Amino acid sequence: MASEEILARLRDFVRERDWAQFHTPETLAKSISIEAAELLECFQWNDSAEPEELRSELADVLTYAYLLADLLGENPDELVRAKLAITNEKYPVEKSRGRSDKYDRL
């Protein structure tokens, strides 16, 4: 499913429930953080997690991220493309391949 189709379905979902009134940049950012913590909780006691629970929590994070991007008038695909271009410059393959060092330590 392409981003535009996902956004259309999310917009319909929110509109049908009259939830846009609760969606501000602040509340959506908080929701992303809360859902990200729930995603992390899947790994709280060991390094493996139930796949279905992981998918569900990741979907929650992505849902709120899409809603926030949409509210801000941003295209999620374009945001990722732009950030990837910046990150690609910070972490050139020849310096960063196989390393986890921060870009200023390469």
Image: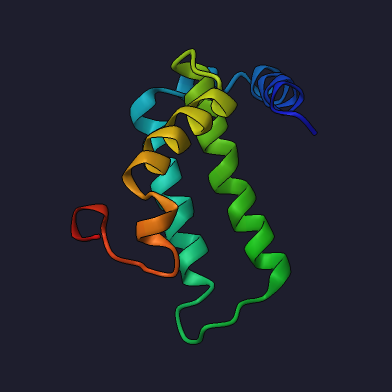
Q: Is residue 103 left or right of residue 95?
A: left
Above/below status of 93 relative to 8: below
Above/below status of 52 relative to 62: below
The furthest residue to the right = 1
Above/below status of 92 relative to 40: above
On the image, the x and y values in percent for residue 2 come to: 76, 29
In terms of depth relative to the viewer, which is nearer, 26 or 88? 88
The furthest residue to the front = 94
* Point 70% across, 70% down: residue: 51
In terms of depth relative to the viewer, which is nearer, 12 or 55? 55
On the image, the x and y values in percent for residue 41 come to: 47, 70
Q: How many marks?
A: 0
On the image, the x and y values in percent for residue 29 come to: 38, 36
Q: Which colour assignment does the render follow?
A: rainbow
Q: Is residue 4 left or right of residue 60?
A: right
The furthest residue to the top = 73
* Point 46% across, 24% down: residue: 22
Q: Is residue 55 left or right of residue 84?
A: right
In terms of depth relative to the viewer, which is nearer, 34 or 47? 47
Above/below status of 31 relative to 2: below
* Point 60% across, 54% down: residue: 58
The furthest residue to the left = 104
Specify the quadrant that holds the N terminus. Answer: top right
On the image, the x and y values in percent for residue 57 come to: 59, 57
* Point 42% across, 42% down: residue: 88
Specify the quadrant that holds the C terminus. Answer: bottom left
